[in-house]
Amino acid sequence: MNQEKSVGDLNTAELLIKCLENEGVEYIFGVPGEENLHVLEALTHSSIEFITTRHEQGAAFMADVYGRLTGKAGVCLSTLGPGATNLMTGVADANLDGAPLVAITGQVGTDRMHIESHQYLDLVAMFAPVTKWNTQIVRSTNTPEIIRKAFKIAQSEKPGAVHIDLPENIAAMKATYGKPLHRDKREKTFASYRTLSDAAIEISKAKNPIILAGNGAIRDNASAALTEFATQLNIPVINTFMGKGVIPYTHPMALWTIGLQQRDRITCAFEQTDLVIAIGYDLVEYSPKTWNPSGNTTIIHIGSSHAEIDSSYIPLVEVVGDITDSLLDILKRSNREGKSMPTALNLRTSLRKEYESYAHDEGFPLKPQKIIYDLRQVLGAEDIVISDVGAHKMWMARNYHCDRPNTCIISNGFAAMGIAIPGAMAAKLVNPDKRVVAVTGDGGFMMNCQELETALRVGNPFVTLIFNDNGYGLIEWKQINYFGKPAFVKFGNPDFVKFAESMGLKGYRVDSHLDLIPILKTALEQDVPTIIDCPVDYSENLRFSQTAKDLHCEIKSFENV
């Protein structure tokens, strides 16, 4: 390592890296390019570890999941043009999913921007719709302010993505003065006494209240307070896809997950409630038009920021402030003595009965419910699964239940295919002592499977479990529901076991209903990434759709049980 340079001897790229170090950045994920050469050179003298990925989309997904798990902005880097456009999907995913991320792109020199130039795109304009804020560094001395602002915006509620564009001539320019800026701490905000009291009054008088918990409650570290709130007031909790684990799934108040685009048993709770207490709920996770189509349900919004405007989501009371403090304060003010248990709790028996019914299912190929049941039996409470997007995601969201927050990561704002493998790598970096499984369909697997080489290279073992149906199963499901037949959704696959072996990984194939549990246990013990090829029977998709159509909500009250 070269001797430490003084601030006046740094170029802009070196100053940028100093500022990133000041922000506590551990990793930068990215692909080298000509227009980010100075940044890469600066990283050779930095404590920050640069992880060379095989595709910029993989790099962005890694930064995305790193940010979601840590609350600190993940950082990804690309060159200009096609490198930057490849980065966009992961950046957009982080922005809609509320994950803090800072994307840095190389760019042509400012002397070339006024003319037609090789690989030049206006990246600031291009990234504007998929970020909270973005800018271009055009003066080296502005670098500390831009980096500090980028991280502050990315990490502030609601978190999201920001983008910084760095022209190559500015990157090489001497930074005559400027130094990293002091990081200010995010202070708590507290809800007003009036809204706390109003919320407590409505909760105290409700007959059949339910809690709808979203990812915001996890981001705000409010899981313990929410569990205490639900326990003391005897109010059932339903979580969104991204709110999994906010209350342990074994808790007597837990009614598991909602968010499917079709009616499900849990839908009945919303049809009979007289009060929805939305805690950390993001509308992007699950549209309120699905659970409150008439807009007549009484809603209390409890969150770190104000409610979004939606005709089906007009809260009677908005409690805006630190979620933990708000819940504990409302709990002190609420009185539900003498109230009957909410009728929705009667759903627990049928939910658990259906879930357990697949424990000894002997069908092959395996039903998705059976795959997920076996996976849940093998993994511990602290282990992490990253779900890709596809038909398997619907079943993971519905059937994979969590004891802890951030142990089942599902992209459900942007819902981008290809996130599972790079996401699992980021999860393993953040949690090296936990077991990590990427759950993906064969379609999503082939989108970013190249990042398994990245995982192998950096010594990052995790398991990839493939639901294999030789097609885009979710689209086929929807096509049959709409038109009665599939179209253009079938494809061929490589031999996934040989694919794994060709990369120096371990590969396994499930050949019977008895295989999955022992294979999972073996795969999780390996010191290299592993792939499990598991055939899946997606005829269950259509059976579920028919069940949803036939569903009639008749929940008996506890007095009548």
Image (tube, grey):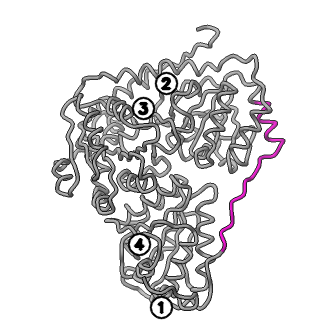
Q: Element at badge 4?
A: strand
Q: Are marks 1 and 4 in contact (CB under 8 Å)?
A: no
Residue depth check, mark 3 versus mark 1: number of the one nearer the observer: 3
Q: Element at badge 1?
A: helix
Pick whichever, 59 or 310, lies toward us: 59
Residue 514 visible here: yes
Neighbor class of circle 1 (other Cα within 10 Å; few <14, some 14-19, many 20+) is: few
Percent position (x, y) of residue 11?
51, 88
Start and end of the magenta stretch? Answer: 182-202
Alpha carbon separation for disc pair 3 and 1: 56 Å
On the image, numbered disc 3 is attached to which residue?
A: 399
Q: Element at badge 3?
A: helix
Alpha carbon separation for disc pair 3 and 4: 37 Å
On the image, numbered disc 1 is attached to which residue?
A: 111
Would you place residue 393 above or below residue 366 in this image? below
On the image, numbered disc 2 is attached to which residue?
A: 265
On the image, numbered disc 4 is attached to which residue?
A: 78
- Residue type for callout 1: Asp
Percent position (x, y) of residue 407?
47, 43
